[in-house]
Image (cartoon, rainbow, N blue to C red):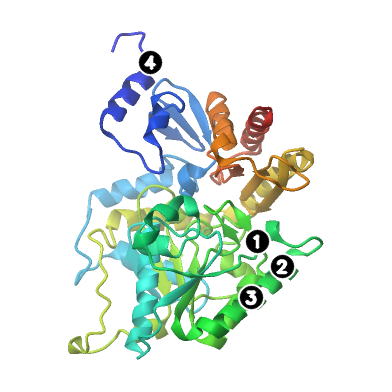
Amino acid sequence: MTPNESRNRALAARDLRHLWHPCTQMHDHAGTVPMLPIVRGEGAWLVDADGKRYLDGISSWWTNLFGHANPRIGAALKQQLDTLEHVIFAGFTHEPAIELAEELVRITPAGLDRVFLADNGSAAIEVALKMSFHYWLNQGHGEKTRFIALTGSYHGETLGALSVSDVALYRKTYAPLLLTPILAPCPDTYEAEPGESPEACAQRRLGELRTLLERHAHETCAVIVEPLVQCAGGMRMYHPAYLTGLRALCDEFKVHFIADEIAVGFGRTGTLFACEQAHVSPDFMCLSKGLTGGFLPLSAVLTTNSVYDAFYAEYNAGKAFLHSHSYTGNPLACRAALATLQIFRDEPVLERNRALAAHLAYRLAPLRDHPHVADVRQTGMIAAVELVQDKATRRPYAAEDRRGLRVYLHGLEHGALLRPLGNVIYFMPPYVVSEQEIDHLVDVAVAGIALAVDV
């Protein structure tokens, strides 16, 4: 590399010779979309190899809560590095995992008293699905083999998680390999009938779910939902009343309730866990992403003693849950999670988030009048702007137009990481973001939207 050559270009060229990136058409990087090498993080900012800074408006795929290179989490990891990096978690244990399980049981909704650790969000969903099915099998109900999911839902990329997802972009190619879920209409407020309130929409959809359960409960293991926000499904949002009714229906029809709080947990929706807003406890709660503050892969599935007891038997009974991951209970990841949760205990995180969310709402409000914005919606520290070709009819832009990509590219030019979901521009910044930094994100997004729709 010559002294005047861009370090970004040199590193990107090396990357593209060998690496295959996730959720990416690699051909885009031949010219349309830059490959940006990041060399360090500073709070809510990322810095590339040429020194340009980008405000991380999506928390690096929703994982980063308290800033990049957070010194408290980093210090905890450094200390753990000097004592134990990893040990097999079958027949062995260690304090970081024990402390983490105790803390998760303490802070999650009542009744979730058992913790199964895995290594990413999709793995957590796989664990919950298998555990629910296996519970019913151990109880003598092997006929229960199906799952109910919401339309537009997304729960991960592994085959089981993808089986209970309903986003064609991810599912269609692999459909021949997948289980077929029973789909219940999502209580998405954006799809409410004219004049219908969010709560009334939720109640109407609960009626439709009841009809499905009357027909299919005998073969259904569980209903799986992302509480309050269907994130990768387009940041679709719904009223907590749906969760309240869902809990009641699952009890009535004897099926499990799986809460996928992988993206919405740890303060994203305004409460520590989204289920709290409906005052419900699921049978399974899946956690990941923000669990370690964005430092290391880790996930947890919390469940009840009742579920645990269905597997607790003499070895020869053959009832053990034999799911495993090599890095289950990794001490480094557990220590990062403990440091992350300590920040929630020591600082007024949720109160600060409420003020930041109010400022974000204030700044986004003018977009409601934009001729190509059909909806501006928000739940806590998650906000989304829905771009459409025709506001009156809500006719969407053609997917091949890639309007959202134009916003993304404009954002990179102007120091902001905004990675839209199709034509939905969303904001999910780290909790250390300032009001001035929110202003920067919104200003860049507004200018990017103007460019994206001016064709």
Q: Nearer the viewer, residue 308 or 405?
A: 405
Q: Which residue, given by chain and number where applicable, does mark 3 sit on?
A: 208
CA separation, marks 3 and 4? Answer: 57 Å
Q: Upstream in the sequence, badge 3 or badge 4?
A: 4
Disc 1 secondary structure class: loop
Q: Secondary structure at mark 4?
A: loop
Seen in the picture, residue 44 relative to 66 is either above or below; the reply is above
Q: Residues within 10 Å of mark 1 (few under 14, many from 20)?
A: many
Q: Badge 2: few (under 14), some or many (20 or more) residues near its Cα, within 10 Å?
A: many
Mark 2 to mark 1 CA distance (whole Å): 8 Å
Discs 4/1, front: 1
Residue at 65% across, 44% down: 396
Q: CA distance from mark 3 to mark 2?
A: 11 Å
Q: Which of labels 2 and 4 is toward the front?
A: 2
Q: Classify mark 4: residues with Cα within 10 Å, few (<14), some (14-19) or many (20+).
A: few
Q: Residue at left 61%, top 80%? A: 210
Which residue is label 4 attached to? 6
Residue 358 shows up from this direction: no
In x, y percent, where is residue 81? 25, 49
Image position of 399 with respect to 153: above or below = above
The image's mark for residue 188 is 1
- Name the kind of residue labelled 3 in the image: Glu
